[in-house]
Image (spheres, helix red, strand yellow):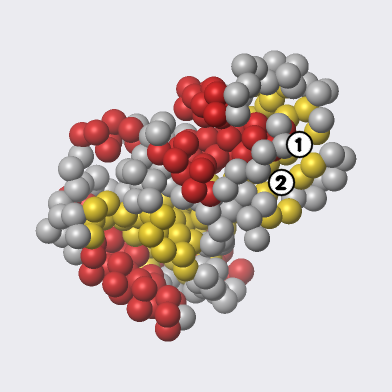
Amino acid sequence: MELMVRVPGSCGELLQGMKAGNPFLVTCPVGSYTTVRISDALSGIHGLGRKSLMALEKTLTSLGKEELPWGLCLESSLPRGKGMASSSADIAATVVAVALAFDYRTYPEEIMRMAASIEPTDGVFYPQVVCINHMNGDWLASYHGLPAFRISIFDTGGAVDTLRYHEQVKEDGENRSAEALALFEEGWQAQDEALIAEAAVMSALNNQSLLYKEGLEELLAFVRQHGALGINVAHSGTVIGVLWPEKFSDASLQLGTQMIRQRFPHLVLLMQTRLQGGGVQVAEGKCEEFVELFR
């Protein structure tokens, strides 16, 4: 037995809020991953936190198994408590890896039900970018062919307990989140980078009344002066994404990012990446090349 499963994290969300009284979020998957390895060359369970341990136990129970007869190791390049979907990626990778080890193929809807029973969940394991109800796990829409924005991810500091945040914060149904979603879908249909980014900006500013990020408006004005289309945020986390055009050059990206770091020294650059599709990738046996599970 030799199996690896990986799931991407996110740069917060492109949008999050309420529509018709129901919560929603639009995912923002990026190229940083949680990877779970199951192997008969391993012994014991390593790297799982409380939530991924719950996912392991729930998956074994759903499969009618009492224990995992192989070793398991979870590794992640996603920082914790920042709003980068680390827990969602951990849970999804664990569920899929354990199920596949027992020759059972899970589907995104099953993963979502399992994940939502543990905590409010980001849908990074769905193919493409999706809109979901992160509280109950309902899938709402998929958006194929979004521009692969270049993203500079900055951390404002500290950490947020996502579960506690959603228990304590009641989202304001009177804000402009439904308007932001309509603008986003207009931009997606028109393949208009500027409209999509403007929708993300609207959602980020809406969220200031719920989880304030100091200097966000000043940062937005500054990055627009240096070629960025806008920003997005982790609505229940600490990160901010600066959204650059898909075809922004490497030189311009590095210059723009350097100027942000000089102007806002309290922000910590975590990574440079791109918006990509979500999903689950699998490598089996001695093959080290990952392939998409959901095509």
Reply above or below: 135 against 229.
above
As drawn, which residue projects farthest toward the left?
A: 174
Reply above or below: 243 against 272.
below
Tell me which residue sits at (52%, 70%) in the image.
144
As drawn, which residue projects farthest toward the bottom?
A: 190
Percent position (x, y) of residue 15? 34, 59
| Res. 64 visible in picture | yes
Q: Residues within 10 Å of mark 2 (few under 14, many from 20)?
A: many
| Res. 76 visible in picture | no
- Image quadrant of residue 21? bottom left
Percent position (x, y) of residue 174? 12, 58
Percent position (x, y) of residue 231? 37, 62
Percent position (x, y) of residue 55? 52, 29
Residue beneath disc 2: 282
* Cβ atoms under marks 2 and 1 closer than 8 Å: yes
Numbered mark located on residue 54 in the image: none
Q: Secondary structure at mark 2?
A: strand
- Using residue 120 as the reference point, say whether residue 255 is left or right of it: right
Tell me which residue sits at (41%, 42%) in the image.
121
- Using residue 212 as the reference point, say whether residue 199 is left or right of it: right
Tell me which residue sits at (54%, 73%) in the image.
145
Reply above or below: 14 against 192.
above
Q: Closer to the camera, 272 or 199?
A: 199
Disc 2 or 1, which lies upstream in sequence? 1
Q: Residues within 10 Å of mark 1 (few under 14, many from 20)?
A: many
* Inter-mark Cα distance, 2 to 1: 7 Å
- Using residue 288 as the reference point, say whether residue 168 is left or right of it: left
Q: Closer to the camera, 153 or 23?
A: 23
Q: Secondary structure at mark 1?
A: strand
Tell me the quadrant of the picture where the C terminus can be found. bottom right
Numbered mark located on residue 3 in the image: 1
Q: Residue type at mark 1?
A: Leu
